[in-house]
Image: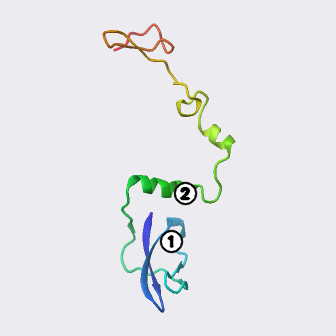
Amino acid sequence: MPVYDYLCDDCGPFTDMRPMSECDAPGDCPKCASPSPRAILRAPNFFCMPAERRKAHSTNERSANAPKTLDQYKASHGAGCGCCSGKPSRLVTKTRSGAKGFPTARPWMISH
């Protein structure tokens, strides 16, 4: 998520992390809470944070206006999806020698 600079007339410059869709909207000053215009004091940069936190911010931003309904969630995952159904999408067998076999996929093919 980008970090932008803003300039408050009373308190001076400050930075704020916000979505790119709101880059031109005025930011509220953290000290006096007055709306302050965006100032180009330096080039916008991306805040470096751990991947888990960045993913959480992205998820929260995506679901901020309307979370997915159950029907939308099921539509995004096909029937037999391994993450939802609890059963694997293909059965894998192994022989004593370590060769893999896929009996449900194409039984006439030899495994590598």
Q: Point out which mark residue 103 bears.
A: none
Q: Amino acid at mark 2?
A: Asn
Q: Which quadrant of the view contains residue 48?
A: bottom left
Q: Amino acid at mark 1?
A: Cys
Q: Is residue 92 above or below residue 60?
A: above
Picture coordinates of residue 28, whole percent (x, y): 53, 80
Q: Is residue 47 above or below residue 112?
A: below
Q: Residue at x 30, y 10 (%)?
A: 97
First along the sequence among labels 2 and 1: 1
Residue extending furthest toward the left: 97
Q: Is residue 30 above or below residue 55?
A: below
Q: Nearer the viewer, mark 2 or mark 1?
A: 2
Q: Alpha-carbon neighbours of circle 1 within 10 Å: few (<14), some, or many (≥20)? A: some
Q: Nearer the viewer, residue 87 or 13?
A: 87
Q: Is residue 77 above or below residue 36?
A: above
Picture coordinates of residue 50, whole percent (x, y): 37, 56
Q: Secondary structure at mark 2?
A: helix
Q: Which residue is mark 2?
A: 60
Picture coordinates of residue 39, whole percent (x, y): 44, 81
Picture coordinates of residue 17, whole percent (x, y): 46, 69
Residue extending furthest toward the bottom: 10
Q: Quadrant of the C terminus?
A: top left
Q: Secondary structure at mark 1?
A: loop
Q: Nearer the viewer, residue 79 or 49?
A: 49
Query: Marks 2 and 1, how far apart in space?
Result: 18 Å
Whether tag 2 and tag 1 are in contact, CB under 8 A, the answer is no
Q: Quadrant of the N terminus?
A: bottom left
Q: Residue at x 41, y 79 (%)?
A: 40
Q: Which residue is mark 1?
A: 23
Q: Nearer the viewer, residue 50 or 111?
A: 50
